[in-house]
């Protein structure tokens, strides 16, 4: 086991005792507070998708610089370029370049591609039209890690969830594919960060999610549990304003959006099927 903070705090624990030895347990201590003050031992990859970057300059700069691996996905390279113009030139000039630029390149301008090639970025063309550039980027990330014997515990994809609903759903599909098609190392966790919201999949089992103090204190801190693609027949929670007690989550019946925290330092969730968990994370957008 490695000691990167994020995923090591997201330990899979099969320790539930004899009565539930087959139930998997996860502890999630990922918080942007940890990301913000990311420790040197933290090993993560950052992926920039093709959406405006709405996070605060200080956060993004720090987050990018301290990443183990930096990837821009197709038009994401342009978004990164635009983000750099928000920083003073003497700072942006010294920033690390993307390690990898991937995509079918229908969105990136040739000029931008050439500029990054000249700077020494590795460019991987992924023309397959059966998968999104985000999905293909995860495969390339994994290949790159294997080639260079790099390990990352977490992959955080940055992309504002706005605009095209099909793309937003496509991004959720990528979360599922990463798991089902083993696109990443089995220990590597994948998150979608959109502005001040962080989303990831909770697999069947028990989950304990640490809630950062800033989120607990925030009077409009929201969270959600959404069943995607299949009914989650049984969900039991604690730590939420609207807890579930062995209830079923299903579109057309009950979907737990606009839920909130009850002030506890952890949220506990037991679910029978995979669900999408999203939560507000503190102060990344300056709002
Ligand atoms: N409107 C959007 N909303 C959410 N995510 C998006 C949106 N547009 C693009 N993305 C994300 O950025 C990635 C890279 O986008 P890209 O520049 O390739 O645009 P695209 O050609 O429209 O997307 P794709 O080629 O994946 O269909 C996409 O795979 C997707 O994950
Ligand atoms: C059933 C089915 N629906 C849509 C597409 C189209 N598509 C899905 S991902 C992608 C890549 C976008 O960069 C494209 C064009 C397909 N191939 N198969």
Image (cartoon, helix red, strand yellow):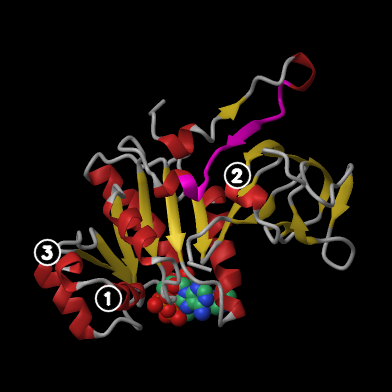
Mark nearest the camera among 3 and 1 is: 1
Q: Is residue 15 positioned above or below 244 on the image?
A: above
Label 1: which secondary element:
helix
Label 3: which secondary element:
loop
- Which residue is the site of mark 1? 81
In the displayed structure image, the side of residue 113 where residue 184 appears, left or right: right
Mark nearest the camera among 3 and 2 is: 2
The disc at residue 120 is 3
Chain-order first, disc 3 or disc 1:
1
Q: Is residue 13 positioned above or below 258 on the image?
A: above
**Tag count:** 3
Question: Is residue 230 located in the magenta-colored stretch of the structure?
Answer: no
Taking the view exactly as shown, the residue that stands out farthest to the top is 18
In the displayed structure image, the side of residue 48 where residue 173 appears, left or right: right
* Residue 131 seen: no
Residues in magenta?
Answer: 21-33
As measured in the structure, the alpha-carbon distance from the residue carrying label 3 to the one carrying label 2 is 41 Å
Rendered residue at 65%/55% (across/down): 218
The crowd level at tag 1 (other Cα within 10 Å; few <14, some 14-19, many 20+) is few
- Which residue is the site of mark 2? 213
* Residue 7 seen: yes
Rendered residue at 72%/61% (across/down): 229
- As rendered, which of 143 and 30 lies closer to the eye? 30
The crowd level at tag 3 (other Cα within 10 Å; few <14, some 14-19, many 20+) is few
The disc at residue 222 is none
Q: Contact, CB < 8 Å: mark 3 with mark 1?
A: no
In the displayed structure image, the side of residue 39 where residue 256 appears, left or right: right
As measured in the structure, the alpha-carbon distance from the residue carrying label 3 to the one carrying label 1 is 15 Å
Rendered residue at 66%/36% (across/down): 208
């Amino acid at each position: 086991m490695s000691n990167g903070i994020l995923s090591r705090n997201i330990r899979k624990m099969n320790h539930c005792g004899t009565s539930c030895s087959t139930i998997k347990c996860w502890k999630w201590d990922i918080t942007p507070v940890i990301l913000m003050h990311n420790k040197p031992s933290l090993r993560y990859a950052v992926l920039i998708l093709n959406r405006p970057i709405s996070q605060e300059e200080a956060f993004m700069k720090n987050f990018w610089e301290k990443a183990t691996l930096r990837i821009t996905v197709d038009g994401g390279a342009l978004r990164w370029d635009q983000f750099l113009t928000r920083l003073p030139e003497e700072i942006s000039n010294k920033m690390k370049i993307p390690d990898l630029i991937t995509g079918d390149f229908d969105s990136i301008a040739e000029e931008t591609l050439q500029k990054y090639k000249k700077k020494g970025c590795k460019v991987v063309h992924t023309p397959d039209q059966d998968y999104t550039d985000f999905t293909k980027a995860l495969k390339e990330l994994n290949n790159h890690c294997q080639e260079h014997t790099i390990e990352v515990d977490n992959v955080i994809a940055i992309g504002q969830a706005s605009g095209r609903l099909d793309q937003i759903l496509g991004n959720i599909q990528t979360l599922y594919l990463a798991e089902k098609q083993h696109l990443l190392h089995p220990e590597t966790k994948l998150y979608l960060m959109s502005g001040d919201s962080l989303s990831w999949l909770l697999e069947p089992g028990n989950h304990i999610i640490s809630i950062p103090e800033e989120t607990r204190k925030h009077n409009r801190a929201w969270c959600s549990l959404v069943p995607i693609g299949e009914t989650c027949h049984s969900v039991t929670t604690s730590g939420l304003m609207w807890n579930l007690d062995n209830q079923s989550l299903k579109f057309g019946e009950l979907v737990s959006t606009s839920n909130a925290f009850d002030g506890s330092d952890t949220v506990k969730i037991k679910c029978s099927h995979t669900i999408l968990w999203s939560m507000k994370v503190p102060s990344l957008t300056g709002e």
